[in-house]
Amino acid sequence: MARLRDLNSLKIIGTISTFFVLICVLLSISSYARAADEDNCLMCHKYRFLGRIDENGNRINYNVDPRIFNDTVHRTIACRECHNYIKKIPHDPVTEQVNCGTLCHVITPFSKERFSHQHIIEIYNSSVHAPKPDDSPKQKEAKPGCKFCHLNPIYSLPKHNIPYDVSLRRCLNCHQQKGVTQAYKHITHRIRRKTSRSSQEIVALCAKCHADKELMERFKVSQEALTAVETYKRSIHGESVTLGSQETADCISCHASNKLHDIYKKDDRRATIFSKNINKTCQQCHEQTNRWFVEIAVHPRSEGAGNPIVYFISISLRFALYGTVFGLVGLMLLETYGRKRKGIKFLLRHGTSWRGKATPEKSKQKIQKNNN
Amino acid sequence: MVAPPDIATAAVEEAAAREDYFTYIEGVGHIPRDIYKHVKSDPAGDLPRYSTHIVIQHILVSTTFLVLAATGLSLFFADVFWAPYVIKLFGGADTARYVHRVAAAIMIFAAVYHILTLVAGTTKKVMNNEFDYRRTQIPRLKDLHDLIHDIKYFLGLEPFRPKMEKFCYKQKLHYLAIIWGTIVLVSAGLALLYPDVVSKTIPEAIFKISPGAATGGAFPTFFQDLARLMHADEAVMALIVIALWHLANVHIVPGRFPFQWTFLTGRITREHQIEEHFWEYIRNLEEIPEEKEYMRNLLREKGFEVSEPMDTTLSRQTPEPGSAEESTPEKEEN
């Protein structure tokens, strides 16, 4: 393969990484849970069968599963901050509903105000969904309130990447511009990718030393280690990364875990490429790894080295290539020469490519003679 | 103007002496081997060659081939200066990888479609008792014979090209190469796309056949190395053959220049058919009454002998004598 590549001697100068912009996205605040149950509401509400059957015969469940609650966006809010109509315990039968515009104890870090959804409520109130004074009760019923749409935790990871400016705008739903951009950048790129640098930057970084044979020869490293960058760049992982792929493996994908700095020699038990761990390493991207798969050389050896059959096939293919090309093209040139000699012209003009037409006129008589 | 006339006549004389200069066709006459120098040809094609199915398959295969070559080779030559530009055209490395797969899937579809066409078409012909292996891509000893004589002709050692069938030696060679290339590229491509699955399947299959053989760890690496090599080398070879030979051979050589429309119209020019596919032309004559009439008129115009029974009338209704159908094209007049 290497030799074929040499057919084309012009190589890229400079880097191509500028083609690619790292698109950071993602809204997720890491899960930290804080008990919200200051008022001990769960003392009763943790019971799974706490509930009743209402006048219409519907079963109503008043159970609040703490495990589920602690995974919701509102996990840090105390029950009574929302259910603020409850003043004493045991409480009276509830007649009110929670108002999403209630101010809660949470102080937003940037504007230092008590937090509420008031801002969104204002927008909502001007939207088509807000009930209008002249709406009939039926119409009011048909419009979604906050609670209709927000039954699910909204801070789940989106499946598709959302561009930076779009997702940042969402932070502004609750935060002021000041400070939040900074916070956004700080958080999101960590959530999205194993490394904040692009794969190209990672390879360039590692290559700074690992492609420098002189430097590496100062250490007692194996032949594979000496040629690691070179061989990586010849693999499909490396070729895709060279062209700007963000999905294929760079050095860090395989040589470090999320701790990023745990790079070891391959016979170290802690190494991601240690025989016992490599399955897990490849599994980040290749779902169906198996004991054969992980043995595939991802730093492909140079041709010939350790694989004489492949080397032999490669040589034969090269012969086949030159043989076919020269054979076919040679035959074509010979054919063209021979046919041109017999009077064919390149262009089909007046319905024929043959000019001259000497043969039949003259030969006709001869042939007729022959036949007689 | 090219060959001195006396040599030409001598050659023709010699050919006539060998009794293969004329081919006698009942209802037409004695067709000289070099009549193609006198026929009228429509650049869009006069005689049927490919069915619509084949034309569609060719369009599918040729477009996907270009897409596959562009995306695949720029991935393979990732460090060469043009590769990033080509990849950018296809929307970046990650998109290009998917484009490559979609194109591959369409090409595989075209291959399956081709096989279905072949099977269905052949079955129909066998049922109607029309199947003739000489009109197919099946290689024969005659092809080798044709190649040798064609070279002799090109060198000026023989007066005429051999009488060839619908597919001549170089086309059969190319067709075989395509079958081989498709098998190699598809199987190696699958190994690159699903390395995890393929690396498991092959050793397990070998293990089933002969337990103990696949216990060594070298197998998966060996097959993957082979797949990497074959996929790239076969693709480069295909591209070079298509770019340097196929395109030139069908569009640039004399008589085909500047463009041969057969791949779109499915029709071949009369001149080309007679020159390179003589026996196929003879079959065309038997199958197409208009062509018969055209050839008869041409022969008469040029002063060759025409067939007796139809000498005076041009009516197409004249039924063919039953016995004439049986006569082989090789039947010579003497």
Image (cartoon, helix red, strand yellow):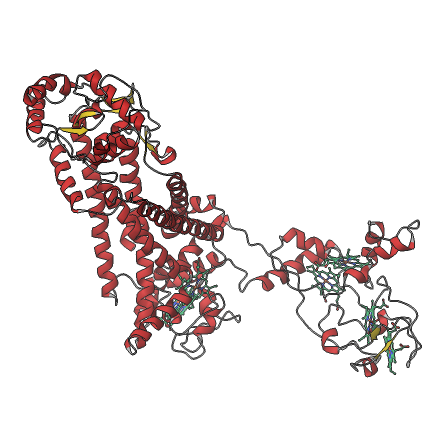
Residue B228 falls in image quadrant: bottom left
Compared across the picture, whether A305 is left or right of A57 comes to left
On the image, the x and y values in percent for residue A11 come to 35, 47
**Residue depicted at x 22% and y 46%:** A324
Q: Nearer the viewer, residue A358 or B181?
A: A358
Q: Quadrant of the N terminus of chain B?
A: top left
> Looking at the image, can residue A5 be seen?
no
| Image height of A241 relative to B88, above or below | below
Where's residue B23, x and y in %? 16, 29
Residue in the image at 65% along x and 51% along y: A165
Query: Is A216 drawn above or below residue A316 in the view shown?
Result: below
Query: With B157 as the anchor, is B110 left or right in this view?
Result: right
Above or below for B103 versus A361: below
Image spot of residue A154 (x, y percent): 71, 63
Q: Quadrant of residue A51?
A: bottom right
- Of B2 and B53, nearer the camera is B53
- Residue drawn where x is 24% and y is 16% of the image: B312
In what quadrant of the picture does the C terminus of chain B appear?
top left
In depth, the one of A230 and A277 nearer the eye is: A277
Q: Nearer the viewer, residue A75 or A56?
A: A56
Q: Residue at x 29, y 55 (%)?
A: A2
> How far across and down, in percent of the image, does residue A167 sit?
67, 55
